[in-house]
Amino acid sequence: MLDKKAHIKGKGLSCPFCGTSSIQGGFIEIEEGKALQGMKCTECEAQWQDVYKLIDMEPDAEDINCENCKKVTGKNPLLELGIT
């Protein structure tokens, strides 16, 4: 039986149809503000899509070349985010 609420509450770590943890994920497809991942249960063979919503971003301060960002935008993105 499909249990969407339990699947979401359980962080998508089990099959929403049979409840086993024998699941496999396919490629992640990125769309505007969300990502979709085709999923399959290897026990009951059910298939579904998990939907991920963009809720935040975290810059990788060590990898950002702020001088290049400043040239392009005229601003230092790390300073604007309060990261020094």
Image (tube, rainbow, N blue to C red):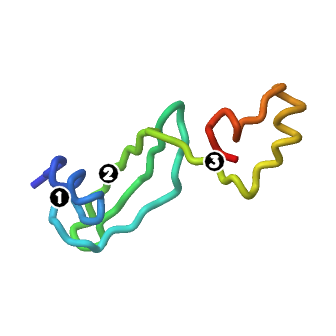
Q: Is residue 23 above or below residue 57?
A: below
Instruction: Please state the horizontal and vertical placement of residue 42, each as a whole percent of the image.
Output: 30, 72
Mark before the other along the chain sequence, 2 or 1:
1
What's the residue at 16%, 66% (across, down)?
19
Which mark is nearer the camera, 3 or 2? 3
Which kind of residue does numbered mark 1 sit on?
Answer: Phe
Q: Give the percent coordinates (x, y) of residue 32.
A: 53, 31
Pointer 2 and pointer 1: residues touching (CB < 8 Å)? Answer: yes
In the displayed orientation, state which residue is furthest to the top.
74
Q: Residues within 10 Å of mark 2 (few under 14, many from 20)?
A: some
> If you read the primary sequence from the N terminus, does the residue marked by circle 3 or circle 2 appear first?
2
> Compared with residue 48, is residue 73 higher up or lower down, i.e. above or below?
above
Q: How many marks?
A: 3
Q: Is residue 20 left or right of residue 49?
A: left
Nearest to viewer (mark 1 / mark 3):
3
Label 3 belongs to which residue? Answer: 59
- Report crowding for label 1: few under 14, some 14 to 19, many 20 or more residues within 10 A (C-alpha): some
Q: Amino acid at mark 2?
A: Trp
Which residue was labeled with disc 1? 17
Q: Which mark is residue 48?
A: 2
Q: Residue at x 29, y 65 (%)?
A: 13
Q: Residue at x 70, y 37 (%)?
A: 79
Residues at marks 2 and 1, CA–CA distance in whole angstroms: 10 Å
Q: Distance between the Cα atoms at labels 3 and 2?
A: 31 Å
Question: Which residue is at the far left?
Answer: 1
Secondary structure, mark 3, is loop
Q: Earlier in the sequence, mark 1 or mark 3?
A: 1
